[in-house]
Image (cartoon, rainbow, N blue to C red):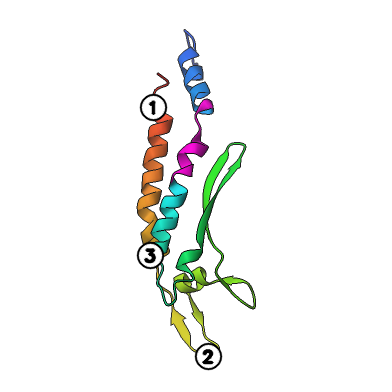
């Protein structure tokens, strides 16, 4: 049998949790949208520059959930297929050939993801003073 006994109060823990609730993670994430767009624009292989110029972002916010979504609306028809995805993963050609993909998104975004993780950790662990 395990017995757990506690004395005192949980006030400091409750205050810390309330402080987290009041902090705006949304505002912290907002600064990374344009940084990611710039990194993706710079890293996108360019024939005519169309795909590079179509990067954008949006912040997704639901109760208890925040994220950044980077988008690219340069598409090829039929199928409404994002050209950025075709460049990243490769694609077949109309003539039966294959164009190998170029991993340009992951290397461009890795430093930004690392910075977001670092900044969010600092935000969460920062004191409420």
Q: Residue at left 49%, top 17%?
A: 15
Q: In which quarter of the image is residue 80?
A: bottom right
Q: Mark 2 or mark 3, which is nearer to you? A: 3
Q: Nearer the viewer, residue 46 or 86?
A: 46
Mark 2 residue element? loop
Who comes first in sequence, dot 3 or dot 1? 3
Q: Position of residue 92 (x, y in %)?
A: 52, 83
Q: Does 75 lie within the magenta span?
A: no
Disc 2 crowd, CA 10 A, few/some/many (<14, 14-19, 20+):
few
Graded by Cα atoms within 10 Å as few (under 14), some (14 to 19) or many (20 or more), the crowding at tag 1 reads: few
What x and y, as percent, mark residue 87? 46, 73
Question: Residue 22, how many percent across, how many down?
Answer: 53, 26
Q: Is residue 81 depicted above or below 127 in this figure?
A: below
- Marks 2 and 3, how far apart at CA: 28 Å
Hey, which quadrant is residue 109 in on the image? Answer: bottom left
Report the magenta residues as a range: 22-31
- Extreme bottom residue here? 95
**Disc 2 designates what residue?**
96
- 102 over 57 or under it: above or below: below
Query: Is residue 29 part of the magenta span, yes or no?
Result: yes
Residue at mark 1:
126
* Residue 69 drawn at (x, y percent): 53, 53
Residue indicated by mark 3: 43
Considering the numbered disc 1 on the image, is that residue within a helix, a strand or a loop?
loop
Whole-Å distance between the Cαs marked 2 and 1? 56 Å
Image disc number at residue 90: none
Residue 52 lies, with reference to residue 30, above or below; the image says below
Main secondary structure type of the part rendered in magenta: helix
């Amino acid at each position: 049998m395990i017995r757990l006994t506690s004395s005192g109060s949980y006030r400091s823990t409750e205050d810390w949790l309330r402080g987290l609730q009041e902090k705006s993670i949304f505002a912290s994430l907002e600064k990374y949208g344009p940084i990611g767009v710039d990194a993706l624009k710079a890293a996108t292989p360019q024939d005519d520059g169309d795909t590079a110029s179509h990067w954008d972002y949006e912040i997704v916010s639901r109760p208890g959930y925040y994220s950044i979504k980077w988008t690219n609306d340069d598409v090829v028809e039929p199928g409404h297929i994002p050209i950025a995805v075709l460049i990243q993963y490769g694609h077949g050609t109309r003539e039966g050939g294959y164009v190998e993909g170029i991993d340009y998104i992951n290397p461009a975004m890795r430093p930004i993801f690392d910075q977001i993780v670092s900044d969010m950790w600092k935000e969460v662990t920062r004191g409420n003073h």
